[in-house]
Image (cartoon, helix red, strand yellow):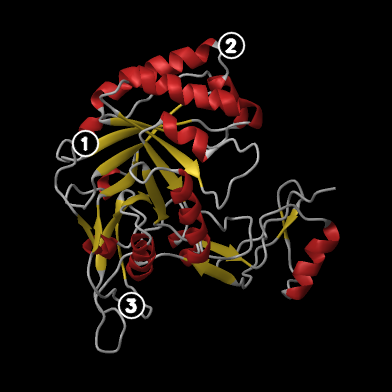
Amino acid sequence: MECRGTVLYKTIFSAVLLCLCMESAVFAGGKKDSAGRTSRKRDEARDASDVSYDINYNYLEPKGEKIKADEVWAYVMTGREKFFSPDMPITDLCYFSADINSYGEITEIPSASFFKDYTGRKHLVITCTGRALTHLSLEPDFKVREKIIETIADASKDYDGVQIDFENVPARDADNFLTFLRDTKKAVGDGKIFSVALPARMKKISDDIYNYEKIHPLVDKVIIMAYDEHWSGSKPGSVASMEWCNKIVDYSKSVIPEEKLVMGLPFYGRSWQEEGYSSAWIFSSVNRIMNQNKITVVERSEDSVPMFTATIPVKVTMYFEDAYSLVFRTRVYEEKGITSFAFWRVGQEDTAYWNWLEIKSSDTDQ
C-alpha cells in the first residue's frame, strides 16, 4: 500500500533548479573582469517581477566574426511577449501558439498586434497536444478537421505565415497528417509562408510519421527541432550535443531542399538529480530514509497521519547554453552551409548571444 502521508522536502539546490527549469530559464551574459569572472549584473524581467542576479562562473566570451544568417526564426510564447525586442536580429517571429482544444476548436488566437513595432515576418504557430486529440483533428471523417482548417485560414489573414507544430501524430494518421498539411496550405493561400516544425531525425526511418521526403513538398519551410536529445527521463547530457546535431543536419540536407531547411537550436538547459524524492513510499523505504538522515521525531496530523520534513543533499547535474556555446553551435551549422536558424525560445537565452548574429540582408520579403 502506498504511504500518502509522507512528505519529504528538499531545499538544497532548489534555487538553482528553478533557474534552470525549461519553461523559465533565462541565462544572462556579462563581461569578464581581469580574473576571468563576470563583474557586471544584468537586470532581466522574469514573469511579473524584476530579478537581478550575478553570473558567478568562468564565463567565456565568444571570439571572431559574427554569424551571418539569411533567416533567423525565433519563437515567442504567449504571456512572454515582454522578453521580445524589435531590435533583436530576427527575420521571422513565430507566435506560440493557437492551440486546438479538447472539442477540436481553436478559440484563442493570439493577436499579431502585440508586435506592431516589429517589421519582420510574423507566423502564427498552431499546436495540438495529445494523441487522441490530434487524431480527432486529422481524421477526414470527423467534421472538426474541416472547421480547424477554416479557422487557421481565417486567422492567417493577420499574419505573414502559419506554422503547424503537431508533435503527437498517431502512427495510423501518418497519411492524414500529409493531407492535412496539403489542405491547410491550400486554404491559407499562396500569399502566406506555410511551415511545419518536425522532430529531429538522423536517418530515414521505416514508416516514419514525420517523413521529411514526403512532407517538404507540401510546405514552404521545414523547421527541424534539433533539441531534446536528452530529456527529463533520460540520462544527463546536452539538450543537443554537436555530434548528434551533425548527424541531423547531414541527413536533413540530403532530403530537404536548402531553401526550405531551417535548423532549430535550443536556448534552454536541463537538470537531473541523482535521486527523486517526489513519489509514493512504502513503509520500509520511509524508515530507511529516516535512518539515513537520523530523523527520530515525527509529527502527526489531526487525523493521526505521521509526517516529517528533512533537508536532504541531492546531487544535481546541469547542462545549459550560454553565448559561447550558442555561437559555437551556430558556427558548426554555418560551416555546413546552414544559414537559416530557429530558436526555442525568446526569454530563455543568454541575451549576449544576440550580439553575435547578423542578418545578411534587411529585406525580409520573399
**Label 3: how many Cα within 10 Å (few below 14, some 14–19, many 20+):** some
Mark 3 vs mark 1, CA separation in Å: 37 Å
Identify which residue, 274 or 189, lies in the foreground: 189
Mark 3 or 2 closer to N-term? 3
SS state under label 1? loop
Amino acid type indicated by mark 3: Leu
Q: Is residue 106 visible?
A: no
Q: Are marks 1 and 2 in contact (CB under 8 Å)?
A: no
Task: Give the label, 1 or 2, closer to the camera.
Answer: 1
User: Percent x, y for residue 235?
Assistant: 63, 63
Amino acid type indicated by mark 1: Gln
Task: Give the label, 3 or 1, closer to the camera.
Answer: 1
Q: Left or right: where does residue 321 sit relative to residue 110?
A: right
Q: Residue at x 59, y 35 (%)?
A: 209
Q: Left or right: where does residue 363 sit relative to residue 150?
A: left
User: Percent x, y for residue 323?
Assistant: 32, 67
**Label 2: how many Cα within 10 Å (few below 14, some 14–19, many 20+):** few
Amino acid type indicated by mark 2: Asp
SS state under label 3? loop
**Rendered position, 185 above or below 197:** above
Q: Residue at x 78, y 51 (%)?
A: 3
Q: Are marks 3 and 2 in contact (CB under 8 Å)?
A: no
Q: Which residue is mark 2?
A: 141
Q: Which residue is mark 3?
A: 60
Q: Residue at x 57, y 58 (%)?
A: 230
SS state under label 2? loop
Q: Which residue is mark 1?
A: 366
**Label 1: how many Cα within 10 Å (few below 14, some 14–19, many 20+):** few
Mark 3 or 1 closer to N-term? 3
Mark 1 vs mark 2, CA separation in Å: 36 Å
